[in-house]
Image (tube, rainbow, N blue to C red):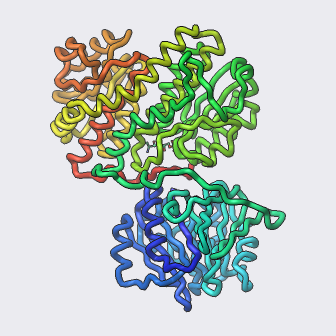
Amino acid sequence: MCGIIGYVGSRPCRDLVISGLERLEYRGYDSAGLALPNGDGFTAVRAVGNLAKLKAALEDVAGDATSGLGHTRWATHGRVTHDNAHPHFDQGGAVAVVVNGIIENFSSLRRELQAEGVVFSSETDAEVIPHLLARAYEGDIVEAVQKVLPQLDGHYAFVAMHASEPQRLVGARHECPLVVGVGDGETFLASAIPAFLRETRDVMNLESGEIVILEADGVTVLNGQGPIKRTPETVDMDDDAAEKAGFETFMLKEIHEQPQALYDTLGDRLRPDGNVVLDDFGLDDAALARTERVHIVACGTSYHAGLVGRYLLEDWAGIPVHVEVASEYRYRTCLAGPGDLVIGITQSGETADTLAAMRVARERGAHVVALTNIMGSQATRDADGVLYTRAGLEIGVAATKTHTAQIMGLALLAVKLGRLRWALSGAGAADLGDELRRLPELLQQYLDSPHPAAVAEVAQRYANHRFFLYLGRHVGVPVCFEGALKLKEISYIPTEAYAAGEMKHGPIALLEEGSPVVTVATDGHVFDKVVSNIQEVRARGARVVAVATEGNEQIAEHSDDVLWVPRAQPLLSPIIAILPLQLFAYHVAQTLGLNVDQPRNLAKTVTVE
Ligand code: AGP
């Protein structure tokens, strides 16, 4: 959460910093700011709101400084105000700092500094850092950072500059991410690679606990023992992903990128005979075959992918699977151990709770694998193995293409484990392989068909309802959870999602004449049961919108509106059934005039617990 960027070089950098912040805005967008050294301290501009507000405030500001730092904020400590926006400064205005993360002992540090006469200008935890640096400063900002770091508790990354050393930036990270970009006579420091990808593809990752010094012509990395050698690596990433490519929003573009994301995630991992090859998994086939249990830990949409994965792994591989939200798993008694496979699902690879849950399981001796979309992310570095989704950069805060790609990743693992554990025959695995291979084309057919326009029309008619209930059974349950999450996060309409069989145990009391109920009623062994639940809610006056399989005319009799999807293998139906629900949420939010790419209070990457 929060995006930070720093630049040192020879080019005027105001616009470079802003362009970097634009590519980090998915990390937080409630306020933003930058600081540029001006020979007599810093020119600082901060603005409440998204970057458009900062850009407007910058109109009259000279852009000729050749170093600077910037920040886009997701508030943790302190309200969304101008004073709480970063950068923060010491009282003399000589030290500028941008911070991502949380300084957990800020209260005691703040009291200590106040007792010494320091006057704070914000409510943030971050502001202690420039004051501590100013107190420690004796002519060298690097030494000041080295003195201050042991005083800080929490998880954070920050970048600092002293006005009397304007061609030097110092960065430090403890758990939160910070990456270096090395250009020709210029260097960048940012929360994520896309911030400087237009300028350089040569990247240096920093480890937790390291300090980095940036100058125009070089980078020095320090750990507790002194300087260490670090060579930049050239990354193969697509900067175009940060463009909307003709779509009105990133979310809509990313919904349409799902066929490609599935195709790329399959790649050459699935062999014609149904064998699956997972490089980087960190376990050879013999060891994987001995796996006794699978634990899946994740948050939000990634958790919902994990819930779908449980059905696949239990059914195809016959292995017991426990799925839990990472924020709970990390604080329970962890019973994972040697012989268990723990999968942390996190598209960003940075979610604090998921990383912590993975760490707990790893300490207990389990084999921990990160299922992630971001190469080199913290999750990949903390895990014993990696299974990459290849969905490309996802910018929309509401996850779409990474979700279906995660399910694809879990499906590949389920086929592989199924073969290794003799739960699937060779022919069975080959058949499932064919079903997986069909999915990208199936999704493309759906997106090219009249169905998405029909979803938009239905969504416009329902957009003014103030509550939605989602009901499904079996693999339809996680689809409902995910569909309901999409609607609430971008339209702010309260939703409940339930296993349809649980409805009579409470949620049915919510229904009144005209209440909309979205059901996942795709073909499968629980279809008739779902139809019975639909009858029950209609008997109480509910209006039913059903996601159903093309050709199943029976459902039309039982529903007010049907969102058709092509037929898929029943256990794989979540990959296709979620599309109309993503689009439904999208069009409801658009009808209500909301910003779907930057929903209020949210951030794409949740690096605080
Ligand atoms: C998805 O729409 C949400 N914005 C959110 O639930 C997200 O899935 C969650 O924060 C987990 O993120 P991760 O996959 O990067 O760990």
Q: Quadrant of residue 114?
A: bottom right
Q: Can residue 274 be seen in this snapshot?
A: yes
The foreground one among 329 and 373 is 373
Q: Is residue 8 left or right of residue 446?
A: right
The foreground one among 82 and 12 is 12
Q: Quadrant of residue 465?
A: top left
Q: Hey, which residue is sitting farthest front in the picture?
A: 272
Q: Is residue 497 above or below residue 78?
A: above
| Residue 70 drawn at (x, y percent) | 50, 70
The foreground one among 207 and 446 is 446
| Residue 310 drawn at (x, y percent) | 53, 22
| Residue 63 drawn at (x, y percent) | 44, 82
Residue at image location 46% in from the left, 65% down from the top:
21
Q: Quadrant of residue 539?
A: top left
| Residue 110 drawn at (x, y percent) | 62, 71
Q: Is residue 534 above or below residue 48?
A: above
Q: Is residue 365 left or right of residue 473?
A: right
The foreground one among 182 and 133 is 182
Report the label total. Answer: 0
Residue at image location 57% in from the left, 59% down from the top:
201
Residue at image location 54% in from the left, 76% down from the top:
68
Q: Is residue 294 above or below residue 523?
A: below
Q: Hey, which residue is sitting farthest bottom in the picture?
A: 40
Q: Can residue 3 be seen in this snapshot?
A: no
Residue at image location 39% in from the left, 34% down from the top:
259
